[in-house]
Amino acid sequence: IVYELLKSEGTRLFSNGDPQRACFKYEEGLSIWTYFYSHNPNWETEGIDDSELVKVDTEGKNQKEVDKIRDIKLNSYLNIAVCCLKTK
């Protein structure tokens, strides 16, 4: 549901001529499924070291979920790409 709200907001922003803000919404929606975190508990004061980052990539528990999440991610990346093309 959160993803659908973010996607709808991104689509509204894009339709209203604001592809940059739309892109942020699509990226936010994508971050539900794929995100990074740092092993370093002091990253806020020490900065982020790429070698301490861990990628979390939700894939689903069964084939139906795997297919749905893959489609959502693909749709998000395509929307982000279109926004990037519009901002150039």
Image: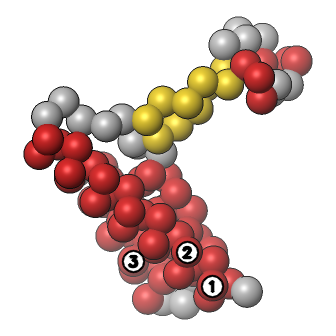
Query: Dividing the picture into quarters, in which one does residue 40 lie?
Result: top right
Closer to the N terminus: mark 3 or mark 2? Answer: 3
Q: Residue furthest right?
A: 46
Residue lying at the far top of the rendered structure: 41
Q: Give the CA distance from mark 3 to mark 2.
A: 13 Å
Give the vertical position of 19 relative to 31 (above or below): below
Amino acid type, label 1 = Leu
Location of residue 45 in the rendering, given as x and y in whole percent from the top left corner: 86, 18
Camera-near label (1 vs 3) is 1
Q: Residues within 10 Å of mark 3 (few under 14, many from 20)?
A: some
Name the residue type under label 3.
Answer: Thr
Residue at image location 53% in from the left, 70% down from the top: 80
* Circle 3 residue: 11
Give the labeled residue for mark 2. 81
Mark carried by residue 62: none
Q: Three-letter amino acid code at disc 2?
A: Ala
Disc 2 element: helix
Task: Tell me the residue at 53%/81% (across/down).
Answer: 82
Q: Which quarter of the image is occupied by the C terminus?
A: bottom right
Q: Residue at x 73, y 19 (%)?
A: 52
Viewed as shown, does residue 45 lie left or right of 61? right
Local SS, label 3: helix
Please tell me how crowded label 1 is: few (under 14), some (14-19), or many (20+) other residues with Cα within 10 Å.
few
Q: Which residue occupies the foreground of this view, 68 or 15? A: 68
Q: Distance between the residues labelled 1 and 2?
A: 6 Å
- Kindly indicate whether the residue at mark 2 contacts the one at mark 1 (C-beta within 8 angstroms): yes
In front: 79, or 61?
Answer: 61
Which image quadrant is residue 73 in?
Answer: bottom left
Res 19 → quadrant: bottom right
Residue for badge 1: 85
